[in-house]
Image (tube, grey):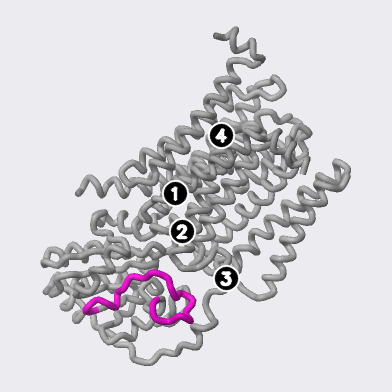
Amino acid sequence: MENFLVYFYENKEAIFVIALAIFLGIEVISNVPSVLHTPLMSGANAISGVIIIGGIILVGHATLSDTLNLALGILAVFFGTLNVAGGFVVTDRMLDMFKKKKKTK
Amino acid sequence: MNNIIESIGVTQGQVILELSYFIAAIMFVIGLKLLSHPESAKKGNLWAGLGMVLAMTTTLFLHKQDGNGIASVNAIIIVVTIAIAAFFGIIVARKVKMTAMPQLVSIFNATGGAASALVALIEYSNPANPSALITLLGLIIGSIAFSGSIIAYGKLDGKVGDIFSSVMTYVNLFLLIAVIGITVYMLSADLSFGAQQTLVYVLFGIAVFYGIMFVMPIGGADMPVVISLLNSFTGIAAAMAGFIYQNQAMILGGIFVGAAGMILTLLMCKAMNRSLLNVIIGSFGGGASAAQKEAGTIKEISVSDASVLLSYSQKVVIVPGYGLAVAQAQHICHEMDQLLEEKGAEVKYAIHPVAGRMPGHMNVLLAEADVPYGKLIEMDDINADLKNTDVVVVIGANDVVNPAAEDEPGSPIYGMPIIKARDAKNIIVMKRGMGKGYAAIENHLFYDDKTRMLFGNAKDSIQKLVSEIKEL
């Protein structure tokens, strides 16, 4: 129990952010028309690419002689970027089609 | 100002970095909020994307660890890697056909999960890491999201079949216990650095394998739910990694997406009237429904009869399903609806929330074919109107129009909201054959007196209809 309290105190900022982010996520999604479910899922997927920041920090401070970790880190940056770049572009493409509709109307 | 900042023991760069993370996090939230309205969606995507670019750029230039910035060699490696990956990602995202969109989202989700797992894998042995537990959780969740998404992709693309045997339930249970067991052991036992290193790779391997086994028995039709769930996992894994770096943008972005993905998953389950647990365990099909044998006969309709029926109808409602997507029939379908409108009919599309392979799949597909947005009517709005509809044309949809959802309490889909196609005066069902839908249950609608079947590939059938209607 005491460990838990210490853990909470030491990480209180993060825990606050987590709790509020959960409510925020639920709130934002709840009133979405089903038309937008696919683009929204795709957009959310692109945002989950924030892991790229971790990849950049990792490779940024990696020792070049530590080949294994450097290689894995580069792979992480590569994958993270795929997630981010591909995710946002695909979402944009999906949404383009809705926009085109508006103009012809 | 510089002096004031330095007087609190930080550099100006650090302050700017943290400020940029704050702004990026806000941009993610605003972005996703804007994404949830049709008019502002495109702007929302841009906001979130710019937030990401901002956070990436400032991290590259301003991030410091133990007082050292990122060395130029490392920075060059990062920039080159990002450039190559971005090039590939954008090319693939632009080239892929709209019908393959769900697969693509699944693949991108897999890469995100892989990145999270790799970061956790490396950071586990970093002595500065604030929490071994969070790191291992990030590793496990990221790995499952990675391999699970790959399998989900394979299933959507038809490369991986549905393999299910009751043994798998036990294997999965064993794997889950192994994952938890190893995690607890690593956290509690006093192990040497070498042993920890070995175990973390073993855990990574088992988690990846568990992801495969977790998705394998789940039916192809449930993949939208699975992808949404795994998308949520990727977000959570990214947040765990954010915890390692005490990075608020990563924590907020990750958890935010995790929560949003989880709600979306539950909404999708609700639309199918099933619990998430039911989807995961995969008890669909078989059971009560298998006992239901069909009485009644199937009545076919010829293309020329169908075209006459359609041409002289006042109100036509088209119910699209996955078959339309598979046959790539959306363009020709739009041509048909324009043709019918020229003849004075009113044509609308009835969109079931879980028609197709992803929520909103049909909307995306029909939008690609330039079907005006206003013609797509959601299920609840169209149902009341169906009684006055002359013809309902069901194109490659099955379970979403199955009256068993209303009539048979024993049916697996009982209680699922459906498009009440049977209320219409006439029903034409386009289907490739008499195969059952993904829920693998009989559909009484096909045997209804008002129903006529038009067998064949949807694209070919509509093509023939269009040429017939033109000649009338």
In front of the other: label 1 or label 4?
Answer: 1
- Label 1 sits on what residue type? Ile
Residue at image position (41%, 76%) is B405
- x%, y% of residue B418? 36, 71
Q: Nearer the viewer, residue B267 or B308?
A: B267
Mark 1 lies on residue? A29
Q: CA distance from mark 3 to mark 4?
A: 36 Å
Q: CA distance from mark 4 to mark 2?
A: 27 Å
Dot 3: chain letter: B
Q: Secondary structure at mark 2?
A: helix
For residue B2, which numbered disc appears in the image? Answer: none
Q: Nearer the viewer, residue B300 or A74?
A: B300
Point out the image quarter for the N terminus of chain A.
top right
- Label 4 sits on what residue type? Ala
Q: Disc 2, disc 1: CB below 8 Å?
A: yes
For residue B282, which numbered disc appears in the image? Answer: 3
Instruction: Give whichever of discs 4 and 2 has the lower sequence position.
Output: 4
> What are the residue bounds of the magenta stretch?
B406-426
- x%, y% of residue B103? 48, 57
Q: CA distance from mark 1 to mark 4?
A: 19 Å
- Label 3 sits on what residue type? Gly
Q: Secondary structure at mark 3?
A: loop
- At label 1, counting other C-alpha atoms closer than 10 Å, the crowd grade (few under 14, some 14-19, many 20 or more) is many
Q: Disc 1, disc 4: CB below 8 Å?
A: no
Q: Secondary structure at mark 1?
A: helix
Q: Disc 2, disc 3: CB below 8 Å?
A: no
Mark 4 lies on residue? B249
Q: Disc 3, disc 1: CB below 8 Å?
A: no
Q: CA distance from mark 2 to mark 1?
A: 10 Å
For residue B267, which numbered disc appears in the image? Answer: 2
